[in-house]
């Protein structure tokens, strides 16, 4: 009976514990759109690992964070922050830009 009680207590503790971070979990990489440009403009990330981007539109106008290579297209209002989850990237360069403003310099994510 004492063994059964110990199992129930142990199971309760495990179920209540916070999720353990997996090696692929990491802090989001932050990108900000401000003063008519993305910052940072170039990001270097590890290849073959999923990544999470946190994109913030810190400008006073709507933008569209877009990338054909990453298959992403997100319209953003002023002050909005979005989370973009990307699968493991193969080594290479992946451009992104503001499709609403063609004069904004492109940014790139370089997976190495």
Image (tube, grey):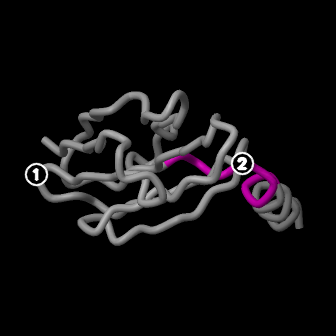
Place of residue 59 in the rendered image (x, y in percent of width and height, measured from the top left): 63, 36
Task: Tell me the number on the disc at residue 106.
Answer: none
The residue located at (15%, 49%) in the rendering is 93
Q: Mark 1 falls on what kind of element?
A: strand
Q: Is residue 43 above or below residue 16?
A: above
Residue 57 sits in quarter: top right
- First in sequence, mark 2 or 1: give its number: 2
Q: How many other residues sit within 10 Å of disc 2, few (<14), some (14-19) or many (≥20)?
A: few
Place of residue 67 in the rendered image (x, y in percent of width and height, measured from the top left): 33, 62
How many marks on residues? 2
Spatial separation of the CA atoms under disc 2 and disc 1: 35 Å
Q: Is residue 20 magenta?
A: yes
Place of residue 38 in the rendered image (x, y in percent of width and height, measured from the top left): 43, 35
Q: Is residue 20 above or below residue 37?
A: below
Between residue 107 and residue 48, name the one nearer to us. Answer: 107
Q: How many other residues sit within 10 Å of disc 1, few (<14), some (14-19) or many (≥20)?
A: few
Task: Tell me the number on the disc at residue 92.
Answer: 1
Which region of the structure is painted magenta? 13-21
Q: Name the quadrant of the N terminus.
A: bottom right
The residue located at (84%, 64%) in the rendering is 8
Between residue 13 and residue 18, name the one nearer to us. Answer: 18
Place of residue 25 in the rendered image (x, y in percent of width and height, measured from the top left): 46, 47
The residue located at (29%, 35%) in the rendering is 43
Q: Is residue 44 above or below residue 106?
A: above
Between residue 65 and residue 85, name the one nearer to us. Answer: 65
- The answer to whether residue 18 of the structure is visible from this angle is yes
Q: Name the quadrant of the C terminus.
A: top left
In front: label 2 or label 1: 1
- The answer to whether residue 30 of the structure is visible from this angle is no
User: On the image, numbered disc 2 is attached to which residue?
Assistant: 18
């Amino acid at each position: 009976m004492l063994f059964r009680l110990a199992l129930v207590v142990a199971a309760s503790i495990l179920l209540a514990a916070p999720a353990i971070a997996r090696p692929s979990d990491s802090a989001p990489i932050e990108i900000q759109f401000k003063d008519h440009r993305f910052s940072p403009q170039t990001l270097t990330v590890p290849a073959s690992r999923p990544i999470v981007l946190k994109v913030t539109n810190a400008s006073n106008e709507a933008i569209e964070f877009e990338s054909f290579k990453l298959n992403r297209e997100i319209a953003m209002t002023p002050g909005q922050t979005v989370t973009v989850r990307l699968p493991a990237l193969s080594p290479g360069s992946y451009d992104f830009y503001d499709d609403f403003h063609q004069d904004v310099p492109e940014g790139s994510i370089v997976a190495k």
